[in-house]
Structures are given as C-alpha cells and as structure tokens.
Image (spheres, rainbow, N blue to C red):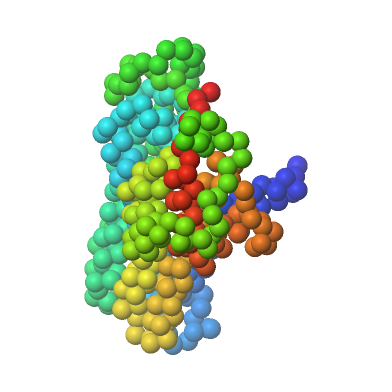
Amino acid sequence: EIRWKIMKNYAMEWLKNPKNLALLVWILAVAVSGAILFMVMTGMLNHAIPKKSSRDAYYEVNNQILNALFTLMCLYLHPQRFLHLYQLHRWNRSDVLALRKIYCKDGLRKPHEWGHMLVVVILLHLNCFSQYALCGLNWGYRRSERPAIGVAVCLAAAIGCAAAAGIYNTLSPLGRDYDLEADARPKLQAPSRTGGRFYSLLERRKSFASRDGKLVERPEWQGGVLDCCMDREVALMSTLCGFCVFGWNMDRLGFGNRFVHIATFLLICSAPYWIFLLAAGNIDNRYVRQGLGFAGIVLCVFGLMYGGFWRIKMRTTFGLPGQRWCCGQPNMTDCALWMFCSLCSLCQEVRTAARYDVRDDKF
C-alpha cells in the first residue's frame, strides 16, 4: 500500500532543502532537453519540423544545453572530490569519520575501507575529467567537424565511470553489512590505512558558548540584517572578498573546509554564465545565443542560494531565531535574504560567529 500522505510529507520536507530544490530543477532541465534531443534524433519531430536545417539547429541547441548542465554539475562536485582525495591521503580520525559518512553504508567501518574508497574517488575524478574533455569537443568543434570517435569515447567514459563508481560502492564491502561488535570497544585507537585498527563512531552536537565558557541556551543574531555598520571591518572585507569571508566563516563554525566552500561558491556564482556563453558560441541563431546568455546570468544569481543553504544550517544547528516574512517559512526567508541582500546576511553571520565560541559536545 502506498501511503500518499507520508510520501507527500517526505517530498515537502525534501524540497525544503535548497540543494534538493536546485537538484530537482537540474533534473527537469536535463529531462526536457534530453527528451527533445531524443525525439529529434529518432525522427519523431520530422512532421513538426520538416526542414533538416531546423532539426539540426534543435539538435545542436539541446546538445549544448545538456553539455552545459553536466559540465556545471562536474564543476560543482569536483572541489569536494579533490577534498576527499586529500582526506584519503591524510587519513586522520576526523577524515575517517567524514569519509565513512559519505561512502560507507550506515557510516560504519568496513573491511579495507581505505582502498575501496580510493577506487570510488578515482572513478569519480575520471568522470569529471571525461566530461571536461567532452565539453571541449562540443565547444571547440562545430557539429559537422566534431570527431565522432572522440565524442563517443568521452561520453562513454563520463557515463561509465560514474556508473562504475556507484556500482562499486554498492557491491564492494562499502555497501555491505558486517558484524561490528569489535567496534563497540570504548578505546579509540590510532588510525591506520591497513584496516587493522578500529574506530569508534563519534557524533558531535554543536552549540554556542559565551566567551567565559558558559553554554548559551538561546543565542541571538548579532545585530539586524541591515546593521552592517556595527562592524565596518567585516562589512569592508565582505564587500571586497565575500567568497573568502564566507569560506572562512563556515570553516570557523565547523561546516567544512574553507577552500572547498570558496571554490564551490565561486563556481556556482560564475560558472553558469561562462558555460552557457561558450555553449552559445556554436549556435548560429542570435536569439538562442541571447537566451542562453540570459539563462546563465539567472543561474548565477540563483547560485546565491548556496549561501542561503548554509545560513539555514547555521540557524538550525546553533538554535538561532528564524524569521518568517517570506512565505511564512524560516528556510525560505534565509534563502530570500541571501538572494536579495547577500552581503548584509554574510555580515550578520560573521558578527554572530565572532560573538560566541563554538563548542562540540560529544555523546
């Protein structure tokens, strides 16, 4: 029996996450462009579009849109994959726990996990590099001059590596269940790449503490959103180098590596424009080129939602008060603040993080 009410509630909860909403939009765009491309290739639109030149234009436009969408996704994911490769090289306790949460079923220790994780990460890197090569062929050659063998090899490698990574992650020990009674020992031993050591799983609860070390039960935002002049130094730095300030603040709050945040945020807010602009260079229709350029600008603006997502994370993690002036939802309000007043929102977050000390309680 399908419980529609539960499914609806789950779907609504899933859509409250800005990342999931962006992923849904990306999937819909891929589905629409892919469907049009498929119908053009199979001749289903021959009656609706009788001219071959028009069908060729439809083919190339949707091919470039798909190329741009998949390249954009790779650019978004690649900094995280580089971080995972570095964590595998460093392999300390925090790296082990973070990588287990991503690659291991239920976040638990698996046999020979280091080697299996390395295989998955390498396959994911090959997926990105194959997509970059395919993107170069699509941008560097017109359709009539594009080497078919090169396109086929790059496309097969991009799809095959991504599929192989998913299959390997599922069928290898990373995706299996094991008896972990040995992991229940209270003593935490030093990490080892050989898999001979054991790690106990730690779960951290973050909270704010005052400067004298006392736990703050109900923390407050430091000033209002528009009170940028409360700390002119923060306002100046946020204006001159907002991406760097954002990454540094996220690192300080314990929300990940600052350099990954900087690279990811910068790519999300700039890559769409350049990708769609380059994709439009191979299209002869002036209106289509202008439309792709405008779409790239719109996607860059929506890239500010990345900051909104982490503002939601900051508010819910540390128990900060939320506002409801946008659709009556605190999450929507946080995203709207970053969309329409990003620098002011960043300044408020930096001031608030500077007011308190972050405390990790282990339990």
Q: Does residue 171 appear left or right of residue 143 in this picture?
A: right
Q: Position of residue 252 (x, y in %)?
A: 40, 42
At horizontal 52% and vertical 46% (from top left) the residue drawn is: 314
Q: Position of residue 82 (x, y in %)?
A: 30, 45
At horizontal 39% and vertical 34% (from top left) the residue drawn is: 99
Q: Is residue 213 above or below residue 133?
A: above
**Frontmost residue, 358 versus 57:** 358
The number of numbered badges drawn on the structure is 0
Q: Is residue 316 above or below residue 202?
A: below
At horizontal 38% and vertical 81% (from top left) the residue drawn is: 289
Q: Position of residue 17 (x, y in %)?
A: 57, 52
Asked if one can make out residue 227 in the rendered structure from this viewpoint, the answer is: yes
Asked if one can make out residue 309 in the rendered structure from this viewpoint, the answer is: no
At horizontal 28% and vertical 71% (from top left) the residue drawn is: 139
Q: Does residue 319 appear left or right of residue 122 in this picture?
A: right
Q: Does residue 221 appear left or right of residue 171 in this picture?
A: right
Which quadrant, please, contains the N terminus?
top right
Q: Position of residue 133 (x, y in %)?
A: 26, 60
Q: Does residue 337 appear left or right of residue 65 in this picture?
A: right
